[in-house]
């Protein structure tokens, strides 16, 4: 079946502009995560959605970052007033059940470059 | 907080050599441990996992054993192939309440030469 998809695959923007990144999880997956990977670093957790529960936003680095998810479908990550340090690969993952140790399936990522 | 430390790369091996990538962790309680792999041009995918002490995860000839006493989860393979060239990430999910995100190491790039 189809995996996690993300769009765009690449995004180049100017400092100060807003960007919106999209994630389509695997159908039926109740949990959705956003992570980011800056050059030379491991992946950092950003935000977690589980069903209709309030999201865990504890990993968002600043109030310029926000994310939404409608039900168990598409999620969008928005970065306002982008800064050069926001340059990274943003990865989305989805998980099938409520068990936190079940496999997270990752999308191919969106490479964001802020000039 | 939780953290994962894995050996610095890059690692370059000849085909059929033995591979070890060291991974140690810091976490309270009994985390679940994972190895993810990212092949060139592809997304991150789960390689293997272990959810309790002394468990051994295995897949595609790779193995890792959850060692609580040494807080380690080293990845091994007896005979690497060129197709194993990739970046390998060690990760954990904590056992505390509200722990559902992966905490990753920085990754180890493996290159296998013929």
Image (cartoon, coloured by chain):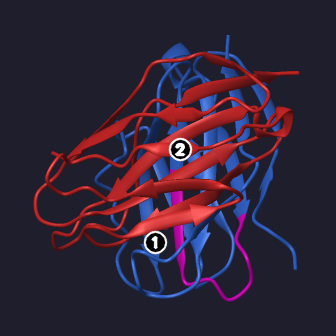
Chain colours: A blue, B red
Residue at point 40%, 34% (across, down): B22
Tell me the SS state at disc 1: strand
How many residues crowd mark 2 within 10 Å: few (<14), some (14–19), many (20+)?
A: some
Q: Does the magenta portion include A32? A: yes
Identify which residue, A42 or B80, lies in the foreground.
B80
Q: Chain of mark 2?
A: B
Under circle 2, the secondary element is strand
Residue A18 in sight in this render = no
Per the rendering, the mark at residue A49 is: 1
Start and end of the magenta stretch?
A: A24-34
**Residue A67: where, in percent of width, then height?**
51, 57
Where in the figure is residue B100, as x and y percent of width and height?
Answer: 34, 68
Question: Looking at the rendering, in which quadrant would you find the C terminus of chain B?
Answer: top right
Query: Mark 2 = which residue?
Result: B76
Asked if labels 2 and 1 share a chain, the reply is: no
Visible in this render: residue B34?
yes
Q: Position of residue A41 (x, y in %)?
A: 47, 25
Q: Is residue A9 magenta?
A: no
Q: Is residue A53 left or right of residue A75?
A: left
Which quadrant would residue A19 be assigned to in this image? top right
Crowd rating for badge 1 (residues with CA inside 10 Å; few <14, some 14–19, many 20+)? many
Vertical placement of residue A91 versus A12, above or below: below
- Say whether marks 2 and 1 touch (CB < 8 Å): no
Residue at left offset 11%, top offset 65%: B29
Disc on res. B53 = none
The residue at 47%/33% (across/down) is A42
């Amino acid at each position: 079946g189809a995996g996690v998809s993300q769009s765009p695959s690449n995004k180049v923007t100017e400092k100060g502009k807003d960007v919106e990144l999209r994630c389509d999880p695997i159908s039926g997956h109740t949990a959705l995560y956003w992570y980011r990977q800056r050059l030379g670093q491991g992946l950092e957790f950003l935000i977690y959605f589980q069903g209709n529960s309030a999201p865990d936003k504890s990993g968002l680095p600043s109030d310029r970052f926000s994310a939404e998810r409608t039900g168990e479908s598409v999620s969008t990550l928005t970065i306002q007033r982008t800064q050069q340090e926001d340059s990274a690969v943003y990865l989305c993952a989805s998980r099938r059940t409520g068990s936190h140790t079940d496999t997270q399936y990752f999308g191919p990522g969106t490479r964001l470059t802020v000039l | 907080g939780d953290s994962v430390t894995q050996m610095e790369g890059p690692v370059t091996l000849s085909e059929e050599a033995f591979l070890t990538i060291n991974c140690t962790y810091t976490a309270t309680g009994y985390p679940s441990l994972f190895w993810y792999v990212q092949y060139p041009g592809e997304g991150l995918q789960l390689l293997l996992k272990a959810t309790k002490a002394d468990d051994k995860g295995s897949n595609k000839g790779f193995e890792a054993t959850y060692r609580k006493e040494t807080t380690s989860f080293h990845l091994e393979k007896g005979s690497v192939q060129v197709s194993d060239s990739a970046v390998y990430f060690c990760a954990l999910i904590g056992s505390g309440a509200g722990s559902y995100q992966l905490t990753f190491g920085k990754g180890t790039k493996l290159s296998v030469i013929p």
